[in-house]
Image (tube, grey):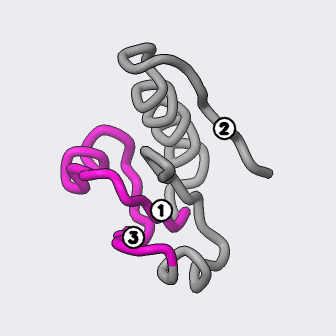
Amino acid sequence: MIEGYIGLPGAGKTYAMVRRAIGAVRANRDMRLATNMELDVPKLRALTGWRGEYVPLTDWPDLVAIRRALVLVDELN
C-alpha cells in the first residue's frame, strides 16, 4: 500500500505522516522503519515500545533496497 500526503506548506502533512507511523509501530513493535526524515529514535522507542530496525534513507538508491518496512519519505523532490 502507498499513502500520499499532499497540501500547502504548513498544512500538517509531515505531522500526519508521523502520527500514522506512531500508530503503525505501536501495532507492530518489530516493524522496520525507513525514512529520510530526522527521527528521534530513542524518543520513538520510549513512546511506543518499538523494537524494530531503523533504516535511514539518504538517497533514492537506498529506497530500492528496502524490503518489508514502513517507508516514510518527506519532501519528495
Question: Disc 2 or 1, which lies upstream in sequence?
Answer: 2
Q: Position of residue 62 (x, y in %)?
A: 48, 80
Which mark's residue is nearer the viewer, 2 or 1? 2
Residue at 55% x, 74% y is 63
Determine the residue located farthest toward the front in the rendered image: 77
Could you tell me residue 7's position as x and y percent?
55, 20
Q: Which residue position holds label 2? A: 4
Indicate the amino acid at tag 3. Answer: Leu
Q: Is residue 54 above or below residue 67?
A: above
Mark 1 → mark 3, Cα distance in angstroms: 10 Å
Which image quadrant is residue 71 in?
A: bottom right
On residue 57, which mark appears? Answer: 3
Q: Is residue 43 magenta?
A: yes
- Viewer-nearest of discs 1 and 3: 3
Front residue of 1 and 10: 10
Left or right: 7 in relation to 45: right
Q: Amino acid at mark 2?
A: Gly
> Is residue 50 positioned above or below 48 on the image?
below
Amino acid at pointer 1: Leu
As rendered, which of 19 and 36 lies closer to the eye?
A: 36
Instruction: Identify the disc placed on residue 33.
Output: 1
Q: Is residue 46 magenta?
A: yes
Magenta-colored span: 31-60
Q: Which residue is located at x 33 percent, y 52 percent?
A: 37
Q: Residues within 10 Å of mark 3 (few under 14, many from 20)?
A: some
Q: Residue at x 40, y 54 (%)?
A: 50
Q: What residue is rendered at 21% in x and 45% in y?
A: 43
